Image (cartoon, rainbow, N blue to C red):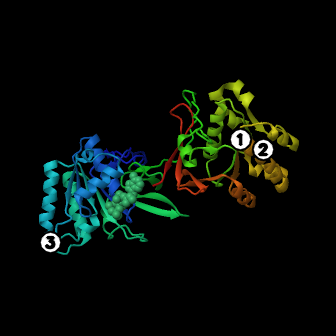
Amino acid sequence: MGGLERVPTGIEGLDPLIEGGFPKGSLILLAGTPGTGKTVFGFKFLLHGASELGDPSLLVSFGEGKENIIENMAYHLNCSRDDLNCVEVLDFVTVKDTGIDSLMETIVEKIDSLNARRLVIDPFSAMAYAFKEKIEVRILVHIISKLIKQTGCTTILISETPLGSESLGAGAEEFVADGVIRLRRKIMDGRVFREMDIIKMRGTRLKRHRYLFTLERGFRVFPQFTFRRTWVKREFAPLPDIGSYYSSGSGDLDELLGGGWPRGSVNILEAEADVDLDAYRSIISITGLNFVTKGRRFLTYDPLRFGTEHLKEYLEPFVGEEEFNRLVRCLPTSPSEPRTLKEALSEASAYIFLSLDALTYNYGESQALRTLLSVIEGVRQKGGLILLGTLDGEPQPKHVRALSTIANIHLKVAEMDGVALIYGVKPKTGYYVMEVEPSKGFPELRLTPIL
Ligand SMILES: Nc1ncnc2c1ncn2[C@@H]1O[C@H](COP(=O)(O)OP(=O)(O)OP(=O)(O)O)[C@@H](O)[C@H]1O
Ligand SMILES: [Mg+2]
């Protein structure tokens, strides 16, 4: 474990990536453009230390006044202002024309009197301008670095970087610092996503450097998408259908869908080629599970990517073999027999999942489309549910575009920095991170918006 004593950061998801936390007594540079979450990160670090571990914690602010900070953080961290009292805030916002000696003295006195174990200077980049005399950032960094070595206080220096700039600070901090983290906010096709780069962390082995995070409920770094087949209890209580919607079996997905899958609807689930297929299958099968546990029929046709073995794995432990055999159909029973598909599709099934890619591949584009349109017609009339799946990069984007116009909902699954994302193409939504959590005893699908 690197041998260094660690300080848990209080940032959800970060500690496992850096061997348990920041090295004790280290100097961390946290850089980012405006609005990337630097203050939230720094404040959570202090709050975690102060409220959970009894570490006296000090925020030295050169940016916002104390009142402002407390109010904003209470709002962003979803807690009361009183919960934040344990963090000591020293603000120098209104301080002008103070000499460096007296300012540093005030800070050192505060650190000493509190016996502070955690310190954040926000933004450090403004500190150099707070003094009467001109002082180079480089020199200031060395002064602070010395101070930290003396006090053993784990410190975050927040550095504001201009928009569009790749630089981290004035140029000296990143070399002196033991750790450098950069936060970024990007917009892709009108959707926000946030990335954290761990540029360096002395004494720490980093497996990867770039991670996705959200400011939803504070600050959370996402682990890589994993699908653990460890259902302990094997119990699944189906979610109720509300109004004119079928529940997807996931409360979070229902919310993204605006209530659930509409009754009598046709929907598209598109996945990018490099997506973890377990993420893609989870969406399809959680809905299947919700249907089958209500005694409804579920039919699938995706011989290449969603075979009987997958269906069994997802559904059978929760419904039993008998119910599984009675309610679930996996087509085709014989790939060379096109009638099998047509006939099976004309059977009444509440929920049908079809792979557009397999349909096109096995039956040709025009017959596939004809078959589809007749199935869609039937499902719409009977008030069932149809989900059409397709993998990006397969030779049918024309198909998808045409069907997207008649589809009620079109979702897309993508991969970014090892994380599985889902978002609405129709209607358009922001990015949600997908996680499949086994701890409740079934593959629970959780979605977290990137805010
Ligand atoms: N829980 C949240 N949900 C949604 N948005 C949030 C949440 N918390 C923070 N934000 C947004 O993120 C922004 C950045 O937060 P924060 O103040 O930590 O950024 P910063 O990097 O310190 O910005 P600045 O460069 O202005 O100091 C806020 O302006 C707010 O719009
Ligand atoms: Mg800030």
Using the numbered discs, state the Cα–Cα distance from disc 3 to disc 2 in whole angstroms. Answer: 78 Å
Q: Residues within 10 Å of mark 1 (few under 14, many from 20)?
A: many
Query: What residue type is disc 1 on?
Result: Gly
* Mark in the foreground, 3 or 1: 1
Residue bearing mark 1: 384
Up-down: is 393 above or below 329? below
Query: What residue type is disc 2 on?
Result: Gly
Query: What residue type is disc 3 on?
Result: Asp
Residue at the spot x=30%, y=63% of the render? 176
How many labels were placed on the picture? 3
Using the numbered discs, state the Cα–Cα distance from disc 3 to disc 1 in whole angstroms. Answer: 72 Å
Q: Residues within 10 Å of mark 3 (few under 14, many from 20)?
A: few
Q: Secondary structure at mark 2?
A: helix
Whole-percent x and y of residue 131?
A: 18, 70
Q: Secondary structure at mark 1?
A: loop
Q: Which circle marks residue 225 in the picture?
A: none
In-image side of 450 versus 257 (left or right): left
Q: Earlier in the sequence, mark 2 or mark 1?
A: 2
Q: Earlier in the sequence, mark 3 or mark 2?
A: 3
Between residue 57 and residue 404, name the one nearer to us.
404
In-image side of 9 versus 368 (left or right): left
Residue bearing mark 2: 378
Q: Which circle marks residue 97 in the picture?
A: 3
Whole-percent x and y of residue 428?
A: 58, 57
* Mark in the foreground, 3 or 2: 2
In-image side of 262 versus 368 (left or right): left
